[in-house]
């Protein structure tokens, strides 16, 4: 995970990493999953 990425968790507690700024800390956002690894999901934030 880099400085330009945030990490959140899905409803079933799976970690998800996606590009975003730190002003989103504490907010709930929608993410589209684009890739997976054995322990982490990787996605892109969906603009609403």
Image (spheres, helix red, strand yellow):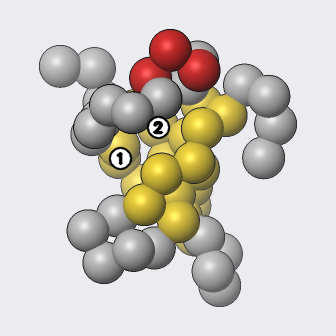
- Give the numbered dot on residue 20: none
Q: Residue furthest bottom?
A: 38
- Position of the C terminus, as image quadrant, is top left
Q: In this view, does 9 lie above or below 6?
A: below
Quick one: label 1, few (<14), some, or many (20+) residues within 10 Å? few
> Distance from label 2 to label 1 (Cα)?
5 Å
Quick one: label 2, few (<14), some, or many (20+) residues within 10 Å? some
Q: Residue 28's image quarter?
A: top left
Q: Locate residue 39, reporting x and y percent.
A: 63, 80
Horizontal side, residue 48 vs residue 3: left or right: left
Q: Are marks 2 and 1 in contact (CB under 8 Å)?
A: yes
Near-viewer residue (37 or 24): 24
Instruction: Identify the residue shown where x is 47% and y is 37%.
Output: 44
Near-viewer residue (10 or 32): 10
Horizontal side, residue 21 vs residue 24: left or right: right
Instruction: Identify the residue shown where x is 34% and y is 64%.
Output: 10
Which residue carries the number 2 mark? Answer: 44
Which residue carries the number 1 mark? Answer: 32
Q: Can residue 34 be seen in this view?
A: no
Q: Is residue 26 above or below residue 17?
A: above
Q: Residue 33's image quarter?
A: bottom left
Q: Locate residue 11, reporting x and y percent.
A: 26, 68
Instruction: Identify the residue shown where x is 35% and y is 43%.
Output: 31
Q: Which of marks 2 and 1 is nearer the N terminus?
A: 1
Instruction: Identify the residue shown where x is 45% and y is 73%.
Output: 14
Q: Locate residue 19, reporting x and y percent.
A: 60, 31
Query: What SS does tag 1 mark?
Result: strand
């Amino acid at each position: 995970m880099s400085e330009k990425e945030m990490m959140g968790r899905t409803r079933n507690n799976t970690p998800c990493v996606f590009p975003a700024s730190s002003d989103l800390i504490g907010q709930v956002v929608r993410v589209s999953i684009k890739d997976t690894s054995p322990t982490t999901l990787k996605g892109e934030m969906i603009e609403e």
